[in-house]
Image (spheres, grey):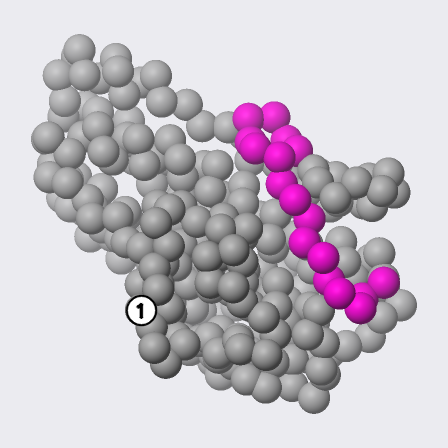
Amino acid sequence: MTCLSQTLPTFSDIAAGFGISSFSLPSLPTFPKPFFGSTNAPGISTPHWTVDLQNIFYGGLVLGLLQYVCKALGINYLTLIPAIAGLSGVTIMDFINGSYVKIKAAINSAGSAFTSLFPVPLFGAVSSPDIETSHKIQFTFSQAIKSVIDIIISKISSITNFISDTFHATIASVTFPTFPTIAAMTAAISAAFSAGSSSVSFSGFPSITIPSFGEIFSPVMQAVKALPMMFVDLMIGMLKPIVTFINDIASFFGSFTWPKLCINSNGYYAG
């Protein structure tokens, strides 16, 4: 089994640590083979797979963190998990549990409350229904993870109310950067492409490198497919202060075991 050492592995950490290639990618719960159905696009499937692996890892991580926080507060964490707008009966738990058929069916039959979250046509002049569906599944998963992170952050002040004033002041110094809007992220990617740049940056977050999509030369499609990768990297920026916070309160509520992202001998995520 190969495991990464990083607590919060980035897109680049995964690519370097696992030496992934389009020829050795295993199925993932929300990205099963054949990738993109009848469409063969290795240049897209590799970065898409990497983000999906991150989603699986971070989805499990944030649920573990939510359970930890809720245990300290005496709350049932399941009561805090939000519904996904426009997808009847689907929550982040369906993504974590790999309910791919259920999720795909819900997305394909979703109403305007969900479809309005995506531009039409999704990839501009490029039409690829299989890739479009996979993209919607992936980005919805990422946004569901972000919603749980927001809940964890909202509970931090409640946690500190149980702790001494001196320690409370220390915890209060933990700050979170402002997460950019989807419109701001899309505009930043488009501006980067126009300027011939391979990276983007937002205040309070590290610079983010836009991945290569191999044979794809559609700026619109590249921008849309880069969005989930950017979204996950920004979520990592939100999780860093939470890591500090959880480690700081360990003496009060017990330590949290930080999982590692691993690939086992069968090629599957095993974290």
Depth order, front residue of 217/59? 217
Left or right position of 252 against 43: left
Which residue: 17% across, 11% down? 166
Residue at left offset 33%, top offset 40%:
152
Whether residue 85 is visible to the viewer of this picture, yes or no, is: no
Q: Main secondary structure of the magenta part?
A: loop
Magenta segment: does it hold 212? yes
- With 200 as the anchor, is 87 left or right in this view? left
Quadrant showing the C terminus? bottom left
The quadrant of the picture occupied by the N terminus is: bottom left
Q: Is residue 64 above or below residue 271?
A: above
Q: Is residue 244 visible?
A: yes
Magenta segment boundaries in residue numbering: 201-217
Question: What residue would you read off at disc 1?
Answer: 1
Q: Amino acid at mark 1?
A: Met
Q: Position of residue 249 (x, y in %)?
A: 18, 30
Q: Is residue 143 magenta?
A: no
Residue 150 in the image, given as x and y percentages of width and height: 42, 41
- Residue 202: x percent and y percent? 63, 31
